[in-house]
Amino acid sequence: MLATGAVAEAAVRHRAADRFTDRVERRLRTGLDVGFGPTPVMLQLARGAFSRVEVSGRDATFRRFSGVDLRAELDDVVRTGDGLSVRDSRVRAEMPADALAAAVATVTGGAAGPSATVTTDPAASELVVHTGPAGRISVAFRPELDGENLRFQRTAVRIGERALPDGLADRLLQGGTPRELDLSGLPLSLAPRRLSVTDQGLRLDLAGGRSTVSA
């Protein structure tokens, strides 16, 4: 009897995960893994609510960023007539260097060049875009949160080891560095809370309050 219950629980978990995944995958354009915590899913289904839903995905699309790794925790997820209601949520987005390079290309309309690459300097909390012939032009900027905007404050421009004055750097780049990304209106009423530069790229932590996910 215990074995039968375990098999039934596993089957229910799988079906519930599939239904939830279908609702979210379309928005993130990636496959997801969904977990429901230690409470038996059959009991949660009987209540019509999930106390904790954990979602993770790789290579997701997030605003202008692609190739993003996401991990989310959703509390008190309740089935409604047209979707799901969520009491609150927490999301961590990890944007590796290649995702940042793609975002730079998009934001600047390709002005940074098709071969632009991005490296990180966690100690200085800076990202460095390498572009131009042989990548000799480097543009350092510090990402900062300004309300619901992700702002990039340019800190230095160099050709090789030579630092350029701001006026000359402006003429050289002609707007070819990202300055700001709008993070308002995200699903689950998410808003940015913390931003950090890591060895791998950029980490963004977001949190949301009560919201709904339509089917």
Image (cartoon, rainbow, N blue to C red):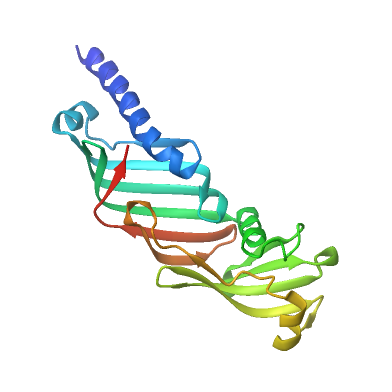
Judge whether residue 98 can be spotted in this image: yes
Q: Quadrant of residue 25?
A: top left
What residue is drawn where x is 47% and y is 54%?
93
**Left or right position of 181 against 148:** right
Q: For residue 51, which quarter of the picture? A: top left
Image spot of residue 177 (x, y percent):
66, 71
Q: Nearer the viewer, residue 2 or 164?
A: 164
In the image, residue 170 above or below residue 17:
below
- Quadrant of the rendering where the C terminus is positioned: top left
Is 177 situated above or below 106?
below
Residue 87 locus on image (x, y percent) = 22, 50
- The answer to whether residue 165 of the structure is visible from this angle is no
Q: What's the residue at 26%, 22% (across, down)?
A: 9
- Please tell me whether residue 112 is drawn above or below residue 27 in the rendered image: below
Instruction: Name which residue lies at 41% across and 60% down.
Output: 205
Q: To which quarter of the image does residue 45 belong?
A: top left
Image spot of residue 213 (x, y percent): 31, 44
